[in-house]
Amino acid sequence: MKLPKNVLVVGASTGIGNSIATYLCNKGHKVIGTSRNPDKCKANYKMAQLDVTFAESIKDCLQKAFSELGGIDSIINCAGYGLAGPIEETTQELLKEQFETNFFGAAELTRQAVKLLREQFYAGGNKGKLIHVTSIAGIVGVPFQSQYCASKFALEGLIESVSAEIYDDSVKLVMIEPGDFKSDFGINRKKANVEKNNAKDAEREKVYIASLGVMEKSETGGPDPIKIARLAEKIINSKNPKLRYPVGSSLELLAVSLKNILPQRSYESLIKGNYSVKKPK
């Protein structure tokens, strides 16, 4: 019988994070979830305040969670949001905001969590796991989500590198890479404003709207994120988890596999076709 785990789920107020935290709590694990506004959250697990864009907030939350749980077996980071828009219309301010949460916040959490979990190990505690929920969009470039993809590509590179640094087996780093699942992720997505100063601008907007429609249809009709929650439990119970776990539809998993097989432009054409990126009639 597997023993209950002590788990901190970062970004547990909505979406995939909420699904993971709820599922793990219902399975008997001791869970603390986090949110920037925990008082507004209704959950069957304890909520704590955390804003990943502030280092002190991360430090305070990790210390309190460690003390309250009596040690941490796994930290699961689900904090992040989406941003969509043509590259010409996406301002530097929007790009920086995207990276502050999706990359720099995750990087600072990684820095502090690895240190805490390593200290726990050397003090005679368990080996800890740091699990980041990244995205298949951190492997495959998606049209009109370039800034979001860039933040996830960067995070994938960071975690792969940090994992290779862990020479003493004190901490296991893992990435769960979801495709489109049914959640409020699309509802909360930020969108760049598209200016229409001429016919070409209007044409580009039509392509963008069509592509965004494909994404949103895939998200609203996507599978239940309980599949990700079950995977998360499998990982926290695993003695030697893999570095990456892509999870999604058969088409999404095929896209991951084909990227390293097909010629690059042929692969790009498939992605464009899937997202309706073509010249309007």
Image: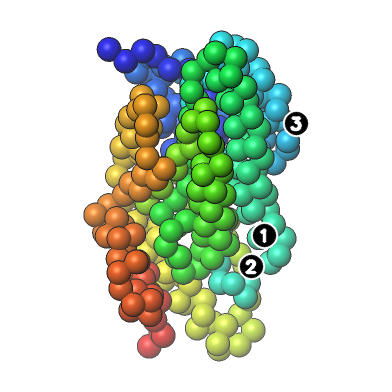
The amino acid at mark 2 is Thr
Residue receiving disc 3? 56
* Few, some or many residues within 10 Å of mark 1 (<14, 14–19, 20+): some
Label 1: element kind: helix
The amino acid at mark 3 is Glu
Label 2: element kind: loop
Q: CA separation, marks 3 and 1?
A: 24 Å
The numbered disc on residue 94 is 1
Circle 3/circle 1 CB separation < 8 Å: no
Res 187 visible: no
Residue drawn at the location 38% of the way across and 80% of the way down: 265
The numbered disc on residue 90 is 2
On the image, the x and y values in percent for residue 277 come to 40, 76
| Coloring applied to the structure | rainbow
Q: Is residue 8 above or below residue 4?
A: below
* Residue 190, image quadrant: bottom right
Residue drawn at the location 35% of the way across and 66% of the way down: 259
The quadrant of the picture occupied by the C terminus is bottom left
The amino acid at mark 1 is Leu
Q: CA separation, marks 2 and 3?
A: 30 Å
On the image, the x and y values in percent for residue 252 come to 31, 57
Tally of numbered tags: 3
Horizontal side, residue 148 vs residue 57: left or right: left
Label 3: element kind: helix
On the image, the x and y values in percent for residue 210 come to 41, 71
> Which residue is outermost to the right?
56
Horizontal side, residue 247 vs residue 47: left or right: left
Circle 1/circle 2 CB separation < 8 Å: yes
* Residue 119, image quadrant: top right
